[in-house]
């Protein structure tokens, strides 16, 4: 055979393969594999159809954000689970930027940009100003293009320039973590970022929820939390234990509730605690895992999920029913959101209810957690006078209220500068000397639990001389 004949045969063969591939893969095709949607971003014109092909051995359900309601673009929703290795197509009749996910595995996400007739992608948020959906879209575009570190740079930018962003920060951070499992599959080091501790470490809560949803393995989840803790070291001292809080979230929501393994809320908790026991190697880890699962139960009550309807006359009954002190503490602390919900975000009423319904030995912790949520709900601007008045109304538990409020500021403050509002609060002349000491101890003496050694030294160096003793 001549060389020219061989070349012609090769060209014909390549052409056949290209035609065959084109036949199998229509224009504007997105493929879902174990590593996520590919391409993660796609740009089409209004009126174009996008085909979503599932190459996993599991069912899938493509739909627009937000999970699980799909309200961003309600028509963009497959409406039901689709079989493994099947496909689904959707024609985009609206212009804009649309984030979507697999409803059955929401840690897989993608972005569809739909151009108008002039070839422009209209910013859906231009006329609305800042809101949760717009902020999340901006952050997730950055996540897709620049990874987790870039997404947190965007969070810091929004936190600085959007006055009301603070109240959404933890929720969005949780969703970043949830959507970062695909990055983890590609490169395990991608989830090791000290920046992810911002916004009350919502990232690790969501990431571990996704991890358990994908693997169902709490033992390997334990190993992953250990890996994250060791990799971050002093850069993010609390990351490992925050990761365990995420295991608790995943255990109650994905291993228990979604599987229907329960007859009552008590059964749900009992099964989830077994998962926490398997995942944990000490009381610290057990407490954080349990705190995540009770936090999940609180969310079920608030959202009316899984048929759970809380008895408003005694919403803390579940906590009293727990046999171990460790789990009672975790429950009383993390049912704080239920109390705020019941009393329309009125801290004073929620706190007075706590004093009446919680066993005396657990009241300090319950007030501490309640005040922490009070701080989160009060950001970015709060009245120190109002907060201190509310704390003083609790009498002997006033100092626990002050301490909890400072902890909440440190958890939910501006990324990298959380300590500033905490110290500002402690500076109030309305605090007694004892309360000031507690406040500064919590906000300064424990800086090393929130920041790296280098950052801690920098902060301490910048403090007025009268406060530097708290750094020792």
Image: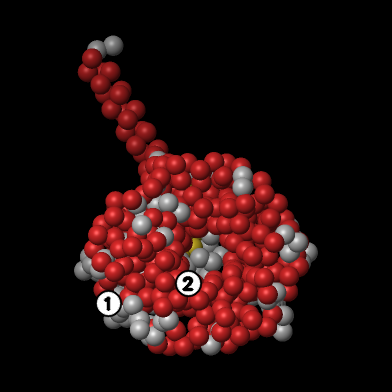
Residue that mark 2 sits on: 403
- Residue 8: x and y in percent read 26, 23
Disc 2 on helix, strand or loop?
Answer: helix
Q: Residues within 10 Å of mark 2 (few under 14, many from 20)?
A: many
379, above or below 217, in the image? below
Left or right? Give the position of 451 relative to 284: left
Task: First in sequence, mark 2 or 1: give its number.
Answer: 1
| The disc label shown at residue 380, or none | none
Residue that mark 1 sits on: 126
Front residue (pair 312, 125): 312
Left or right? Give the position of 68 relative to 294: left
The N terminus: image quadrant: top left
Left or right? Give the position of 269 relative to 385: right
Q: Residues within 10 Å of mark 1 (few under 14, many from 20)?
A: few
Q: Residue at x 68, y 65 (%)?
A: 328
Disc 1 on helix, strand or loop?
Answer: loop
Identity of the residue furthest to the top in this view: 1
Query: Mark 2 and mark 1: span between their CA atoms?
Result: 41 Å
**Tag nearer the camera, 2 or 1:** 2
Question: In which quadrant of the rendered view does residue 415 lie?
Answer: bottom left
Q: Residue at x 65, y 70 (%)?
A: 362
């Amino acid at each position: 055979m001549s060389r020219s004949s061989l070349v012609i045969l090769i060209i014909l063969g390549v052409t056949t393969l290209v035609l065959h591939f084109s036949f199998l893969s229509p224009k504007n095709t997105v493929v879902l594999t174990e590593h996520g949607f590919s391409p993660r971003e796609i740009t089409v014109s209004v009126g174009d159809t996008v085909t979503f092909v599932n190459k996993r051995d599991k069912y899938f359900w493509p739909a627009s954000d937000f999970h699980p309601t799909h309200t961003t673009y309600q028509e963009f929703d497959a409406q039901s689970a689709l079989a493994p290795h099947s496909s689904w197509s959707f024609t985009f009749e609206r212009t804009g930027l649309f984030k979507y996910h697999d409803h059955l595995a929401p840690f897989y996400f993608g972005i569809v940009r739909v151009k108008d007739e002039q070839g422009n992608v209209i910013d859906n948020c231009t006329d609305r100003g800042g809101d949760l959906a717009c902020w999340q879209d901006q952050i997730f575009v950055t996540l897709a293009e620049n990874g987790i570190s870039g997404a947190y740079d965007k969070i810091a930018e929004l936190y600085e320039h959007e006055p009301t962003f603070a109240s959404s920060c933890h929720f969005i951070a949780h969703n970043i973590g949830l959507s970062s499992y695909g990055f983890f599959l590609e490169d395990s080091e991608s989830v090791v970022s000290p920046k992810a501790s911002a916004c009350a470490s919502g990232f690790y809560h969501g990431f571990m929820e996704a991890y358990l949803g994908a693997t169902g393995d709490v033992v390997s989840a334990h190993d992953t939390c250990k890996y994250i803790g060791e990799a971050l070291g002093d850069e993010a001292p609390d990351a490992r234990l925050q990761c365990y809080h995420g295991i608790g979230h995943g255990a109650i929501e994905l291993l228990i509730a979604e599987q229907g393994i329960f007859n009552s809320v008590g059964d749900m908790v009992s099964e989830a605690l077994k998962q926490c026991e398997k995942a944990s190697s000490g009381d610290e880890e057990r407490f954080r895992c349990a705190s995540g699962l009770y936090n999940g139960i609180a969310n079920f009550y608030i959202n009316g999920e899984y048929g759970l309807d809380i008895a408003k006359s005694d919403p803390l009954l579940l906590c009293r029913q727990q046999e171990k002190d460790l789990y009672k503490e975790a429950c009383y602390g993390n049912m704080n959101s239920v109390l705020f919900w019941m009393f329309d975000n009125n801290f004073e009423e929620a706190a007075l209810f706590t004093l009446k319904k919680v066993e005396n030995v657990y009241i300090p912790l319950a007030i501490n957690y309640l005040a922490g949520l009070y701080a989160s709900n009060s950001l970015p601007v709060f009245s120190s006078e109002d907060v201190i008045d509310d704390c003083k109304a609790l009498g002997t538990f006033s100092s626990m209220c002050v301490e909890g409020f400072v902890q909440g500021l440190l958890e939910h403050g501006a990324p990298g500068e959380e300590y500033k509002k905490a110290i500002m609060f402690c500076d109030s002349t309305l605090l007694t000397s004892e309360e000031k000491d507690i406040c500064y101890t919590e906000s300064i003496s424990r800086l090393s639990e929130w920041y790296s050694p280098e950052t801690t030294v920098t902060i301490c160096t910048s403090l007025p001389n009268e406060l530097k003793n708290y750094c020792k």
